[in-house]
Image: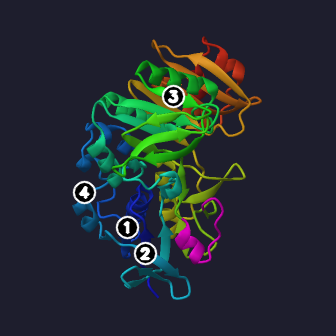
Amino acid sequence: MSDKVIIIGGSHAAVACADQLRKSGFDGPIGLHSREAELPYQRPPLSKGYMSGSVSLDRLHLRPKEWYSEHAIDLHLSSNITSISTQTKEIVAANGDRCEYGKLVLATGADARTLPADMGGALPNVHVMRDIDDANALMREMAAGKKIVIIGGGYIGLEAAAEAAKTGLAVTLIEAAPRILQRVACEQTADAFRALHQAHGVTILEDKQITGIEAGDDGLARSVDLADGTSLDCDIVIVGIGISPNTDLALAAGLDVAAGISVDEYGRTSNPDIFACGDCTVLPMHNMPTRLESVQNAHDQAGVVAENIAGKAAAYHPEPWFWSDQYDMKLQIAGLNRGYDMVIVRPGKREGSVSHFYFKGEKFLAVDCINDGATYMMCRKILAADKNLTPSMAGDAGFDMRAMLR
């Protein structure tokens, strides 16, 4: 029987799992199979620094090429795994190659949702933003003076809008919901980002439904049509309407799948020899199935999976954090605001800094910190220690939250 650990995916979670396996004392063979040709890389900077040119491809790489050989990790690039045989404990690649595993880790990530082809989603200048090829294609087309329409007012759409505006494009952002960031942030945070983008010349259209993207005589997208009859001229379109977890392999292998690959607190799937981590998973958090789309979750959950494969029986207790950089605004989020019914606004000590605290009754859930790094770091520690920060404390500018950590 093989003692090999095979990791499917080239994501942050995949590399973090391989790294932690070695740090946890696992000295057996490790194989990492990525469907991409590029060395595994960071994804968040694709819609931030990489698009602006301030972050090079080398700096995106999670590890240099030699790291894999130095740690005896057998890296397979352009490796498209098409099926898993749980009976023979093998993975099967598109070229027919088979490889036996002792333990298998699915770190397959997620793909960007696209618009249907009959709505114009397959036109050559209609893009998503998920991988290096997406970013490179956009960078080749983005030039000052062009008109870009961005569909989706979440963080990916807003970050792309910021980079496009800084490049000198005329930017229009369309959000189908009544306001931007409706799924992930409070009105106060949305208001701050709306004002920021408008100050940089971005047109934001909320509560607008698109009916299709129309091609010109050259076969390229030339207008985005809205349900109210408006037609927006465009040279480029970015679709930022969320992601879909890559669960096909898991489903075909008979694993339990919900809104992602279902795992327990140890990262185990419904098959005891198969684990999963990162964006592709649904995990238990506060007794609720939860998907966490973040680098923090990918790294930490992958580390727990590795420790369990190495025999350490570690449970994962998520401590979520997220961030977004747009223009000169840095948003840092600690916690998960699910189920909040109250928001407390607390100005920061520096000019232009503010934090929005989320509560459910008296329970502190999360915080959005805008250019307020000191508050963010304190809140991360308060949440991790499960300290009882109350709405009255958060709303009292004179209350020193550091006292809660002494």
Residue 272: percent from left, percent from top: 60, 75
Amino acid tagged 2: Ile
Q: Nearer the viewer, residue 149 or 139?
A: 149
The disc label shown at residue 64, or none: 4
The disc label shown at residue 49, or none: none
Image side of residue 275 versus residue 285, left or right: left
Task: Tell me the SS state at disc 1.
Answer: loop
Mark before the other along the chain sequence, 4 or 3:
4
Characterize the magenta stretch by its predominant secondary structure: loop
Q: Which residue is mark 3?
A: 204
Amino acid tagged 4: Pro
Q: Nearer the viewer, mark 3 or mark 1?
A: 3
Mark before the other along the chain sequence, 3 or 2:
2
Image side of residue 130 versus residue 256, left or right: left
How far is the residue under mark 3 from the one under mark 1? 36 Å
Residue 387: percent from left, percent from top: 66, 32
Q: Are marks 1 and 2 in contact (CB under 8 Å)?
A: yes
Task: Tell me the SS state at disc 4.
Answer: loop
Q: Nearer the viewer, mark 4 or mark 2?
A: 2
Q: Nearer the viewer, mark 3 or mark 2?
A: 3
Q: Which residues are magenta?
A: 247-260
How far is the residue under mark 4 from the one under mark 3? 40 Å
Up the image or down, 201 lies above or below 126; here it is: above
Q: Is residue 249 magenta?
A: yes
The disc label shown at residue 35, or none: 1
How far is the residue under mark 4 from the one under mark 2? 23 Å
Residue 374 seen in the current view: yes
Mark before the other along the chain sequence, 3 or 1:
1
Residue visible at 51% across and 88% down in the picture = 88
Amino acid tagged 3: Ile
Mark before the other along the chain sequence, 1 or 4:
1
